Image (tube, grey):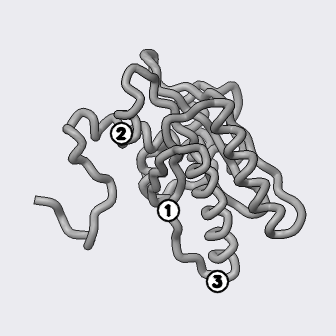
Amino acid sequence: MAEGRFRGRVPRILGVDPGTVRTGWGVVEKGPRGLSCVAGGAIELRGSRSERLGRICRELVDIARRYRPTAVSLEKAFAAANLQAALRLGEARGAVLAAAALAGLEVFEYSPAEIKLAVVGYGRAEKQQVQAMTRHLLALPCPPGPDEADALASAICHLHVADVRERVGGSFSVARKGGGRRA
């Protein structure tokens, strides 16, 4: 677990919601009083595809240097109805993974349903529900934008999962292979 390398340091997770028009990001910290939002926002992307991907990577490396997270959390790739959209999302995810590697951070991935379940309590929650619960859980003065909320939710999800892993000795896993029940 990434937090194990940072004994004595408060877990601080950089959540990312990759996109080719806007990439959301948020840094969430788990302290003695619970979860708090350290910073967040969205990277607005313009220019050619290579310029956009380069900007995602550069900005996230800068964010990692500035806020010093202990790990990165993002949504797993999912099958999209539009092949071109899925390819573009894969490219944006690649830029995020490259930024994490450059910053020396371990990456944790969760399905959209796992993130929604961890934050809202319902795996098919709507964007507005994720925004509202992210605001509530982090005691934000107003709801974050949809991309920032998704990024913060990803970070919250990882902190919840890491907390459960720690309590059960590292054997807990959200994702199950084969869809069967564990014995």
Q: Secondary structure at mark 2?
A: helix
Secondary structure category for the residue under label 3? helix
Residue at 18% over, 64% down: 181
Q: Is residue 46 above or below residue 81?
A: above
Residue appearing at x 63%, y 48% in the figure: 128
Q: Nearer the viewer, residue 99 or 128?
A: 99
Query: Who comes first in sequence, dot 1 or dot 3?
Result: 1
* Residue 61 x, y percent position in the rendering: 68, 44
- Residue at (47% x, 45% y) in the render: 120
Q: Which of the two residues, 169 or 161, is positioned nearer the viewer here? A: 169
- Mark 1 and mark 2 lie on one chain; the one further toward the N terminus is 1
Q: Give the answer, above or below, for where 176 lies relative to 101.
A: below
- The residue that mark 1 highlights is 76
Residue located beneath label 2 in the image:
162
| Residue type highlighted by circle 2 | Ala
Other-residue count near label 2 (Cα within 10 Å), few / some / many at <14 / 14–19 / ≥20: some
In the picture, measured across the screen, residue 71 lies left or right of residue 2, that is right
Furthest residue toward right: 47
33 or 61: nearer the viewer:
61
Work out which quarter of the rendered image holds the C terminus and state it.
Answer: bottom left
Three-letter residue code for mark 3? Leu
Residue 54's quadrant in the figure?
bottom right
Q: Residues within 10 Å of mark 1 (few under 14, many from 20)?
A: some
Give the percent coordinates (x, y) of residue 82. 65, 81
**Quadrant placement of the N terminus:** top left
Residue sitting at 82 percent across and 52 percent down? 44
**In this picture, residue 131 sits left or right of residue 172:** right
Dot 1 amino acid type: Lys
The tag on residue 85 is: none
Cβ atoms at labels 2 and 3 below 8 Å apart: no
Kindly identify which residue carries mark 3: 83
